[in-house]
Amino acid sequence: PSYQGGNDLEQELDVWKRAGDGFAGIGAGTMFAWSLRSAAYVEIAAQTVFPFSAIVVVPSVGLALGF
């Protein structure tokens, strides 16, 4: 829905914040192998970025093949 009805100049804007060039973190996860060379995994991690301080929660789900 339009927030400014009748305004042809209304625009959408995506905003991003860059918090740092490096990061350090800790996480935990689990992997379920259904054959010798394939598995599904899920994990969650907490990371901090630097030189500017920000804490980031990083969930991850995926498949591992050929490990």
Image (spheres, rainbow, N blue to C red):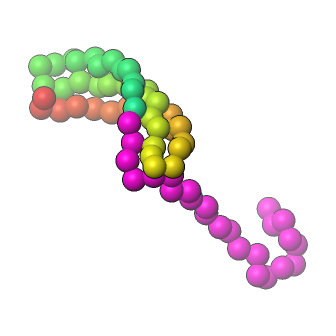
* Quadrant location, the N terminus: bottom right
- Residue 40: x and y, percent? 29, 25
Q: Seen in the image, is 39 located left or right of residue 8?
A: left
Give coordinates of residue 42: x percent, y percent.
37, 25
Q: Is residue 36 left or right of residue 62?
A: left
Q: Residue 27 at x, y = what percent? A: 39, 24
Indicate the quadrant where residue 62 lies. top left
The image shows residue 25 at horizontal and vertical percentages of 40, 32
Residue 60 seen in render = no
Report the side of 1 relative to 37 (left or right): right
Please tell me which residue is depicted at 79% across the width and 82% down the height of the picture: 8
Q: Residue at x 76, y 81 (%)?
A: 9
Q: Is residue 5 visible?
A: yes
The span shown in magenta is 1-24
Task: Return the residue nearer the eye: 11 or 22.
Answer: 22
The image quadrant where one finds the C terminus is top left
